Amino acid sequence: MNKQGNTYTFIYSVILVVVVAALLSIISLSLQPRQNENRQNEKRQNILSAIHISSTAQNSAELFNKYIKEQFIVNDKGQRIEGNAFNVDIKEQYNVAADKREFPVFVADVDGATKYILPIYGAGLWGPIWGYISLDADKSTIYGTFFDHQGETPGLGAEITTPAFNNQFQNKQIFSGEELVSILVIKGGNATGKNEVDAISGGTITSKGVENMLRNYLTYYEPFLKQK
């Protein structure tokens, strides 16, 4: 075959593409277990952060098993349904009709006190935001929060990840009597109520995204939260 001809060049290119694609597929498959493990460790770390437990990728599984005593899934009526709570992808569930979603619940024991940890998901200014909120045994008093984002602006909306923002939520109330009031994120540093926190300066839209995310998901969980 003429190595200078178009046919040779075409065949060589096809073979090269096939070989490279095969190698990439092999590499991707070989890395998949490690990637899955990293995702699971990160999820455990985030859940633990909502109850003020610091962890690393190396000890997250051990600490998760130590503090998380129960996990289950509820539907929009607060009824338990079958399934593995840890395996529920809250991002995928976000695009499912609310009456068909799966809502995970993680029950922690922190120094002998029961905490309920609920995953939440919503929209910020530039992309999705998500996190976890933990509640005391009364299912109204916030014990801790963890928030994260995909692409919020550093120094502005991205501040939802900082202790300064998250610490405001501790001991706030999501119920007023029997009414679910959730948490209001107030602009201008004027938050004074039991269900109010201050918005991020310069990050109003992301702050409101957090407010909407909390209200939406706490509403979904409301039937469960009102169970005695």
Image: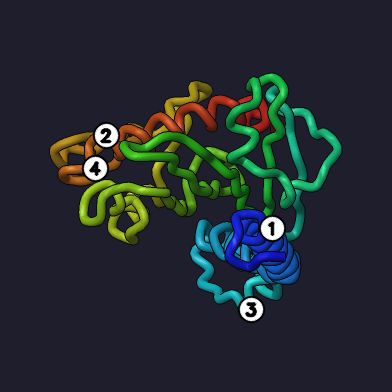
Of callouts 2 and 4, the N-terminal one? 4
The answer to whether residue 188 is left or right of residue 29 is left
Q: Which mark is residue 59?
A: 3
Q: Which mark is residue 198?
A: 4
State the residue position of label 2. 205
* Local crowd size for mark 3, using a 10 Å CA cut-off: few (<14), some (14–19), many (≥20): few
Answer yes or no: do the residues labelled 2 and 4 have beta carbons within 8 Å?
Answer: no
Pick out the residue farthest to the right: 82
The residue carrying mark 1 is: 11
Say what secondary structure mark 3 lies in.
Answer: loop
Q: Residue at x 69, y 52 (%)?
A: 107
Q: Is residue 171 above or below residue 20?
A: above
In the image, residue 99 lies at what x, y percent?
69, 19
- What residue is at 27 percent from the left and 34 percent from the top? 205
- Mark 2–mark 4 Cα distance, whole angstroms, equals 13 Å
Q: Is the Cβ of the residue at disc 3 closer than 8 Å to that at disc 4?
A: no
For marks 3 and 4, give the one nearer the viewer. 3
- Residue 53 on image: x %, y %: 53, 68
Residue at position x 53%, y 31% from top?
218
Give the CA distance from mark 3 to mark 4. 34 Å
- Front-most of 194 and 84? 84
| Quarter in which the N terminus is drawn | bottom right
| N-terminal label among 3 and 1 | 1
Q: Where does the image place residue 63, in percent across and percent down from the top left?
A: 66, 72
Residues at marks 3 and 2, CA–CA distance in whole angstroms? 36 Å
Question: Distance between the Cα atoms at labels 4 and 1?
Answer: 64 Å
The three-letter amino acid code for the residue at tag 4 is Asp
Type of amino acid under label 3: Asn
Tell me the amino acid under the disc marked 1: Ile
